[in-house]
Each structure stands twice: as C-alpha cells, then as structure tokens.
C-alpha cells in the first residue's frame, strides 16, 4: 500500500510505538479523516489504549480518556457548571469530552443513559450543559473500546447506537515476531515519551476537507448500493445496512482512497472497508447465529459473488 | 556427400509417394494411359535437385517430350488446348488438354515445394496424409482399387519420414537404422501373414458377395448380391451397398444375367443343355421389333458374369482392346475366350472366368406390340425338350398350389392375361415385401407353397419363383431370370446418365413364353415396376413414355399393401437423377468438413484477429473501453481465472502473477482511471489490451 506522504509520516510515527497493526492504524486514520468514530473491539491488553494515545501524540491533538463504569453519570462526561464564590457566578467546568481524541474505554460497562450521552455528543459534536450549548473542539474523534468476552455486568450497545460508529475494528493479537519486537521496544525505553507530533490540528482539518473532494464514480456508487441491498436481501440477516450505512461506506471509502494518495474511489476501497463498516450494522437472524455464521462471513460472501460494476450508466440488478 | 545421398533419397521417396496420385486421379478421367503423368510428376522432382535453370529447362522439355510422345503432335494439341480454354470460358468443364497441363503444373510446383522446403516435416506429413487420403477416397468411392498399392504407400511414407529425420538431425547412431528396419519388418510381416493380403484389402463398402445358399450357412442371414447357387432359396438377408458395376449410355434398364429352368421345390438348379430353335442370346421372335443399344459397363472388381440389357449381347470390347462376338458358342479369340452358357450367362473362359474391368456391350432391346402380347397360339417354336423343361414342376409340389394357379387364372385366356392375373394376385392379396423376417422352408416344405399359403412375406425370389410355378401350372412355359435392377442414378456425365448398380440391386424375375412373340419378361415382385423391364409398343402412340404405356406402373401407385418404405431394393423413381445432381457431391462435403475443421482448430486465432480488427479500428471511447475490458475478462474467465466478485486490480494482480509480467496492472490502471476516476480514456489502453489478448489467447 502506498500512502499520501503526510499519512505515511503519521503511520511511521505511530509505528515507532505500536508494533504491526498497519491495517488498524490505517483504518483508524480513515475514520478520523472521514469525520467518523471508531469502535475497537477486542480482549483487554492488546494495545487499544496505547493505540489511541499514540494517535493523539502523533497528531498534535488533545487526548482525553474516559474509563466507563456502571455508576457513571452523563455529567461526568460533559462537565458541570459550578458556583464560584469569588466571582459569584456559575463557572463551566469542562468534562472529559472536551478533547480532540477521546478514548472511551469499556463503553459497554456503563449504563445506557451515559452511553447515549456519549453517542449523542459524537453525532452532534456539541453538548448541552445547564441549557447552554457547548460546542466540542474540532477535530473530534472518539475511539471507543469494548470487550467482547466480559459480558458479566455489561450493557450491550443498542443497534441504533452502534450505527453511529463509522468503523468497528478488531485489534487482534500480534504475531510471534511482532510480539518479540514489542518486547525489545519496551525493554529499556518508553517509545511514547519520545514521540513527536508530525501533523498539526489544522492540517488534520485540511485533510478532512480534502477527503470530501475525493471522486466517487457512479460505478462505485452502484457497487456500494448493491452491496447494501445484498445485506438487506440475504435471508441470514434480520437487519441489513441502513441508508446511514450506505453513506458511511462511501465516506469511509473516500477517506481510504485519500490516504492512499488517490483522488477517486476504487471498488477495492469499498471491498477493503466493507467488513469494518457493515460488521456491526448487520444483524444476523437467530437461525444464522445458531448455525455459527458471523456477519463478517456473510459480508465476505457477498463480496465474493457480487459483480464489480464497470459501467457509468446506472443499472438496477 | 552423405547429405546429397540423403537428399536424393528424400526426393525419390517424395516422387514415389506422389506417383500414387496418378492411378486414381487419371483413372477417373477419360485418358487411356497413365504413363505420361508419371513422367510429368517424377521428372521435375528429380530435376529440382539441379540448379534452377536446369530444373526449369528439364521440366519444360519434359512436358513437351511427354506431350509429343503421347499425342503425336504439338501443334494439333495446342489447338485442342485453345478450344478447351474457350470452352472453359463459356462455362464448360475442362477437357483433356487443360487437365494435362494442370498435371504438368502440379508436378512442377510440387518439385519447387519439395526442393525449397527441404527437409520439411510439415511438407512430408502433408504429402503422406494427402496421398493416403486420395488413395482411400478413390478406393472407397470410385472404381479405383488401391488394394496392393496402399501397403507400398505406407512403407514409402515411413521411409520418407525416416529420411526427413536423418536430414534434420544427422546422427551417426545405428539405433535409428535398427528401429526403422524393425518397424518396416513388422509392417511387412504383419501384412504378409494377415489373411487379407490375397483377397480383401478393400472395405465393407465395396466388397461383398452373396452366398446365402452356401452349405452350412442355412440358418444364417445372407447378404444381398448376385449369387451362383440358387438351389436353396429363402431366409433373410442383409442389405449391401457395395458397387458391382456402373453403367453408362443406357436408360434405366434391368440387367439380365441368366435364366434357370428347373425348380426343385427348394430352389432352382442349372438348366441342362436343351435342344432349341432359339439361338443363344436370342430372347424374342424374329418379328418383334428391336432397338440396338450400346452400354459401357465399368466393374468395381472383376466378376464372373456379364449383365446385359436385352437380346443378343453382340459385341464386347474390353479394356485390352480385343473385340469379339458373343453370338456364337464357345468361339475362341486371340486373347480371351468367352461364351454364352445355356442359361444365357456370358462367361469369360480364362483361368478365373473373370471379366475385364471395362466392357463395351451391344445388344438389342425388344419392344413387343400389344398384338404380339395378345397372341394365343399353340406352341410350336419350342422343342419338346424345352417344353418339358419350362413346364417342369416337382412331383412334391402340393396340389393346393396347382388349384390356386387355376383359380387365379380362371378368367384368363391368353398367356399374357394369365401372367397379368398372377402379377395382380400378388399385388392385391395380403402379400408383403420384406427381406428380414423371411422364412426358409424346412424339411419337406415347398418353397412356393410356404410363401403362397403360410408366410405371404418375402422378397424377389419368393415372388418370382412362385409366379413361375403358378404360370407353369397353367401350362405357360416360364423360366426364372436373375440379374440386377437398373440401380441408382449417380449423375449425368457427358450428357449421359450413369447408373450405379450395387449388390442390393440384385434381383430376380421371370420370362414366360408367347408363341409368336418369344420370351416376355414379367415383374411379379410387389412394389417393383415393370417399366424398366418390358417395353410395349402401341401402334397409336409409339413415342410416348414407356412408363405411361405400362398399365402395371400406374396401377402400382394405388396398390394398398405397397411398402411405405421400400427396403432399399430399388423402385422406379424418375426423380432420382435430378435429386442426385442437385445435392452436394461427396468431395464438396469433404471440403466443407475440412474448412470447418480448420476453422475450429484455429478458432482462437480467428477470433483474436477479428477482435483486433474490430477494436483497433474503433475510436477508444468510454463504452468501447468497457466492452474491450469485458471481452478481456471473458477470455480470462475462459482461461480459468476467477472473475466474478473480483475488482479489476485484484484480477490484475492474479493475472500478472500468473504471466509474470505487469502488463495487466498497467492496463487496469488505465481502465480504473477511465471508469472510476471518470477521465478520458488513455489511448495506451489499446496497446496493453492487445498485448494481453495475445498473451491470453496464444
């Protein structure tokens, strides 16, 4: 894969800390540039937090971390107004949401009430505190993590809220060699401390604007729509991709094409992101789950059989 | 030095193989000699070993020398040539002169080919395949007989391949010589021990001979054809399309071979020599009108009989040029002796009693007047001996046959009326024509009785023998005649219809005697028409078509139990000639098959070229680019690449990995730019497309 130089420098910087995981880094960058948010799903300890912290370091962004617990309240996120006795006025004390990169750790451990506050902030890019609208800083990028195996005492995210994450990324364990390299790297130093930012906040905003300029041909649009339609038609799904998913897939593909230094989207881009975009949006029927099917399997199946459109003119299949 | 020896042997062997073309090709023309063509083919080939001017000089000189020796005059021949050329220009087929020069040119060009391509496997294989092909084709479909020659052609082919190999890869090793020696010995050994060497190299199509009455073959299925032994008739037989002879120069006519007089209850036996007032070969009374006719008969293989179409087979001209009269009995001639047997059979009295391959025959075709047929006089012309023989009936003949005979002819007065009554009886009652489920009389059963009362199912022998017996029971002298029907019209050659007479046209009918008219033929067999056997003159309308004159022919069509599909044994069908000349001849089919085969073998290249021409000459637009890419993907799919569900670049990676190149990737980039970036197509696309198509379809 060849990247745009600025992107390449970010990836190189992050890779001084994170071993391997190029795909995860690229996808996270894609979500950041497409203006979306990422749901990282994996077991504890594979480097989710480290990834987010490195991200915020490499791109000169303000990093905030929220550790979700069951007793957390929405105001713990948004911040509160406190009475200042000196000035005799209410003063706004910003919550952890007032940052550029938010690590929302173990999002499924908190109550739905708090979850929805976060997700609303993600969608609206603003919070209301005491009737006052507080606009969140830009860029605003949430990386939420959830642990798949710790079901005890968790509140699974409702479908409607999952839909707000542009991508769901699985970290996965490092390979044998990667893990050796990991040990070596952390043996004597702390690489994160040495990391210098390579891209400024403004540059990121500039890139976000440029991503929207990436061309999407009608052939690729057809490809996206056909894929989403496939997800709705498949008898194994009881909920296919929503029009929001269609939009998400296109935006993600644009960003993916952008980071690969291209100003147009290829069907390959759609293919590369399809499982990450649709994986958490497609819900399987009980029967399909019982048979051991997974959403990713289904999506891969659709991609294998769906012909790639080559025509400009729109044909409904 | 060694190289030259190899080359000379190579050329000699090529000439040897090509010389096999002469016999079949020239044999099917009107040329009476083959030798000039051997010179025309072989001499230029040998001359091609010399420098080109000598080669051309010798070839031209050879042509004129051969021509002069064959024709006797060059100027005269030039006139013929011009005449022929003018004929061709006005749409006629070429004659001898053009054929002669064409063969000369073929010889010359082959010489050029052989010497210019030396040594060439392709040419050698081409020569071998075409030589063997020509030989087998002509052997199968014409009168050419490649029996012995094909073995020599195969040996020559093997040697030629060996010499080509020697010339291509000179080697001192003896292994090759040993292996070719071994191969040749095996071929020769196999050929000589195989039982077919003596008799039968030809195929099933041309060979077969009936002997359905052979001893020990009583219950088996016979094969149709002309047989000698008729002592036990009956039983089923197989159809056989083998050619017996080809007749030219006559209208559709039955071919008589011989007549037999003594019925045994099971079949017919040879007639003893009878004291007679009829001359041998004479069939009718002297006051019956006859028309002379001349026929050219070409036999597929030598036979032991000569078929003739009428009375007094007078003169026969063989291929050796000897002319002789047949009319006198057992008359000797310088080269051959032939005679007419008492049965009317013409026999060549040489060692094998075999006929020449070509016979020019003259005879008279009798045409009876109605008055002559209606005569009912006492028989005085036949001697007592003859009357006895032709009225003979076996003592074992069941009485009910005699009773039936009288019953059939109850209303008939004259012999002719009686004959017609018998003929009509077969056509009106529940008789059926069949060749397969035909019974053979066992024990004391009479052949005729069985047919008339039990089976009512049979072929010509059943009908004719029964008719003869029924007429004899009525006191009409009758004899049983064997021969062939008129055969299949094979086309019009030089204005004359040729008929192919095959084994399955073997037939039998009867002749009955009318005092004052002679022996009158009768066709008793169901579904056969008499019009090609019997000519009747009518005073009122002598010119009209004999078919119309024959009451039987018109009655024929209405016969209720006429077989729907006549079992091969031929019927009169006047449409035959037109039908055959309209259809595509055999060689036409072969050419079509060959062209189709070439197209199928080269379909990829042809398709590729068409695609090149089509797409390269069109401007590259968005839609044409997409179509080109689709075609490319189709070809890739045909080559086993998985195309469905692949993006262009995924496919490109796989294709490039397979062909170890990066052309497909380049092509795909251009494609992506046109389709997905929606930019104007890049003309370089065509270039890479062509490269890829060539790679995929090679």
Image (cartoon, grey):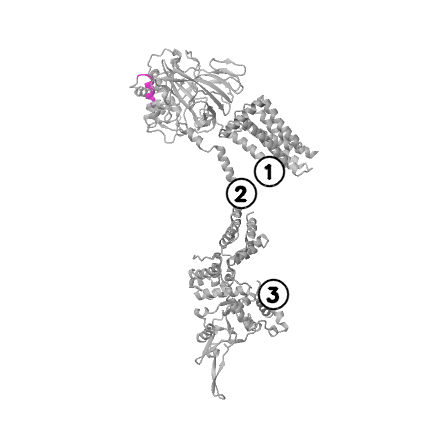
Task: Please state the chain letter of the residue tagged with numbered disc 3 in the rendered image.
Answer: A
Q: Which mark sits nearer the N-terminus, 2 or 1?
A: 1
* Residue at mark 3 to residue at mark 2: CA–CA distance: 54 Å
Horizontally, residue B469 falls left or right of residue B642, namely left
In this view, the residue farthest toward the left is: B411
The magenta segment is B413-423
Q: Which is nearer the eye, B86 or B491?
A: B86
- Labelled pair 1, 3 in contact (Cβ < 8 Å): no
Q: Secondary structure at mark 3?
A: helix
Protein chain holding label 2? B
Which one is nearer the viewer's eye here, B98 or B607? B98
Looking at the picture, do discs 3 and 2 lie on one chain? Answer: no
Q: Identify the residue position indicated by label 2 in the image.
A: B602
* Distance from Cα at disc 2 to Cα at disc 1: 17 Å
Depicted B80 relative to depicted B163: above or below:
above
Q: Nearer the viewer, residue B433 or B579?
A: B579
Q: Quadrant of the N terminus of chain B?
A: top right
Residue B434 visible in the current orientation: yes
Q: Which residue is mark 1?
A: B122
Q: Which mark is residue A177?
A: 3
Q: Is residue B62 magenta?
A: no
Question: Residue B461: horizontal and vertical position, in percent?
Answer: 40, 24
**Crowding at label 2, few (<14), some or many (≥20) Cα neighbours within 10 Å?**
few
Q: Which mark's residue is nearer the viewer, 3 or 2?
A: 2
Which numbered disc covers residue B276?
none
């Amino acid at each position: 894969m060849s990247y745009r130089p600025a992107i390449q420098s970010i990836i190189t910087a992050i890779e001084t800390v994170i071993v391997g995981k190029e795909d995860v880094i690229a996808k996270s960058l894609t979500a950041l540039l497409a203006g979306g948010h990422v749901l990282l799903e994996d077991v504890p300890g594979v480097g989710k937090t480290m990834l987010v912290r490195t991200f915020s370091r490499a791109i000169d962004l303000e990093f905030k971390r929220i550790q979700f617990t069951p007793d957390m309240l929405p105001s713990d996120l948004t911040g509160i107004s406190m009475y200042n006795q000196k000035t005799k006025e209410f003063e706004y004390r910003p919550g952890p949401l007032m940052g550029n990169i938010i690590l929302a750790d173990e999002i499924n451990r908190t109550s739905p009430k708090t979850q929805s506050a976060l997700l609303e902030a993600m969608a609206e890019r603003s919070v209301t505190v005491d009737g006052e609208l507080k606009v969140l800083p830009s860029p605003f990028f949430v990386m939420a993590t959830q642990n798949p195996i710790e079901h005890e005492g968790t509140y699974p995210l409702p479908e409607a809220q999952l839909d707000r994450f542009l991508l769901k990324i699985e970290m996965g364990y490092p390979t044998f060699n990667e893990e050796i390299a990991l040990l070596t790297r952390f043996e004597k130093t702390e690489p994160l401390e040495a990391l210098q930012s390579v891209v400024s906040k403004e540059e990121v905003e500039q890139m976000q604007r440029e991503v929207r300029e990436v061309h999407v041909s009608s052939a690729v649009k057809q490809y996206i729509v056909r894929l989403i339609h496939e997800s709705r038609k498949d008898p194994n799904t009881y909920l296919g991709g929503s029009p929001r998913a269609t939009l998400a897939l296109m935006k993600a593909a644009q960003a993916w094409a952008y980071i690969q230094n291209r100003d147009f989207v290829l069907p390959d881009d759609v293919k590369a992101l399809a499982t990450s975009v649709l994986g958490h949006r497609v819900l399987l029927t009980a029967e399909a789950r019982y048979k051991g099917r997974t959403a990713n399997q289904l999506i891969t199946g659709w991609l294998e059989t769906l012909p790639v459109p080559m025509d400009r003119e729109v044909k409904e299949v | 030095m060694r190289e030259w020896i190899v080359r000379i042997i190579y050329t000699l062997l090529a000439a040897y193989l090509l010389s096999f073309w002469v016999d079949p090709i020239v044999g099917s023309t009107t040329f009476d000699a083959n030798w000039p063509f051997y010179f025309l083919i072989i001499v230029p080939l040998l001359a091609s070993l010399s420098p080109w001017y000598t080669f051309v000089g010798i070839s031209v000189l050879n042509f004129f020398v051969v021509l002069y020796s064959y024709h006797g005059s060059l100027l005269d021949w030039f006139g013929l040539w011009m005449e022929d050329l003018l004929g061709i220009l006005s749409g006629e087929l070429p004659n001898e002169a053009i054929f002669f020069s064409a063969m000369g040119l073929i010889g010359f060009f082959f010489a050029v080919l052989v010497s210019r391509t030396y040594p060439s496997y392709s040419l050698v294989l081409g020569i071998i395949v075409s030589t063997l092909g020509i030989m087998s084709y002509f052997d199968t479909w014409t009168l050419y007989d490649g029996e012995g020659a094909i073995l020599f052609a195969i040996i020559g082919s093997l040697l030629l391949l060996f010499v080509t190999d020697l010339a291509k890869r000179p080697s001192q090793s003896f292994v090759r010589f040993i292996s070719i020696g071994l191969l040749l010995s095996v071929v020769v050994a196999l050929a000589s021990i195989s039982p077919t060497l003596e008799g039968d190299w030809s195929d099933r199509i041309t060979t077969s001979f009936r002997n359905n009455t052979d001893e020990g073959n009583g219950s088996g299925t016979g094969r149709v054809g002309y047989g000698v032994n008729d002592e036990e008739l009956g039983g089923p037989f197989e159809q056989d399309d083998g050619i017996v002879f080809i007749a030219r120069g006559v209208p559709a006519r039955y071919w008589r071979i011989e007549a037999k007089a003594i019925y045994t209850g099971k079949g017919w036996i040879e007639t003893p020599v009878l004291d007679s007032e009829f001359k041998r070969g004479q069939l009718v009374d002297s006051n019956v009108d006859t028309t002379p006719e001349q026929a050219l008969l070409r036999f597929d293989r030598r036979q032991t009989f000569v078929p003739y179409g009428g009375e007094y087979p007078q003169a026969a001209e063989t291929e050796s040029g000897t002319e002789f009269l047949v009319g006198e009995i057992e008359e000797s001639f310088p080269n051959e002796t032939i005679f007419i047997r008492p049965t009317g059979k013409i026999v060549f009295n040489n060692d094998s009693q075999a006929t020449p391959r070509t016979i020019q025959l003259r005879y008279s075709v009798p045409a009876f007047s109605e008055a002559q047929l209606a005569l009912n006089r006492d028989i005085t012309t036949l001697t007592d001996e003859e009357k006895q023989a032709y009225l003979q009936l076996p003592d074992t003949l069941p009485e009910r046959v005699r009773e039936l005979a009288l019953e059939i002819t109850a209303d008939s007065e004259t012999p002719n009326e009686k004959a017609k009554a018998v003929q009509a009886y077969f056509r009106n009652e529940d008789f059926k024509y069949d060749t397969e489920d035909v019974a053979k009389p066992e024990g004391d059963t009479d052949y005729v009785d069985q047919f008339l009362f039990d089976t009512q199912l049979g072929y010509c022998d059943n009908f004719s023998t029964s008719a003869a017996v029924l007429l004899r029971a009525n006191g009409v002298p009758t004899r049983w005649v064997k021969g062939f029907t008129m055969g299949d019209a094979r086309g019009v050659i030089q204005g004359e219809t040729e008929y192919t007479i095959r084994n399955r046209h073997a037939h039998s009918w009867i002749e009955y005697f009318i005092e004052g008219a002679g022996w009158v033929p009768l066709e008793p067999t169901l579904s056969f028409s008499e019009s090609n056997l019997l000519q009747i003159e009518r005073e009122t309308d002598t010119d009209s078509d004999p078919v119309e004159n024959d009451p039987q022919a018109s009655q024929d069509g209405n016969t209720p139990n006429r077989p729907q599909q006549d079992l091969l044994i031929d019927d009169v069908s006047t449409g035959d000639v037109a039908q055959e000349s309209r259809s595509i001849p055999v060689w036409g089919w072969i050419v079509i098959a060959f062209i189709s085969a070439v197209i199928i073998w080269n379909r990829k290249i042809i398709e590729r070229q068409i695609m090149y021409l089509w797409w390269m000459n069109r401007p590259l637009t968005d839609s044409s680019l997409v179509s080109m890419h689709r075609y490319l993907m189709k070809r890739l799919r045909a080559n086993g690449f998985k195309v469905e569900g692949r993006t262009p670049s995924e496919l490109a990676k796989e294709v490039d990995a397979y062909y170890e190149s990066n052309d497909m990737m380049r092509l795909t980039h251009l494609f992506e730019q046109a389709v997905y970036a929606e930019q104007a197509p890049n003309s370089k696309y065509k270039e890479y497309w062509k490269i890829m198509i060539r790679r995929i379809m090679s």
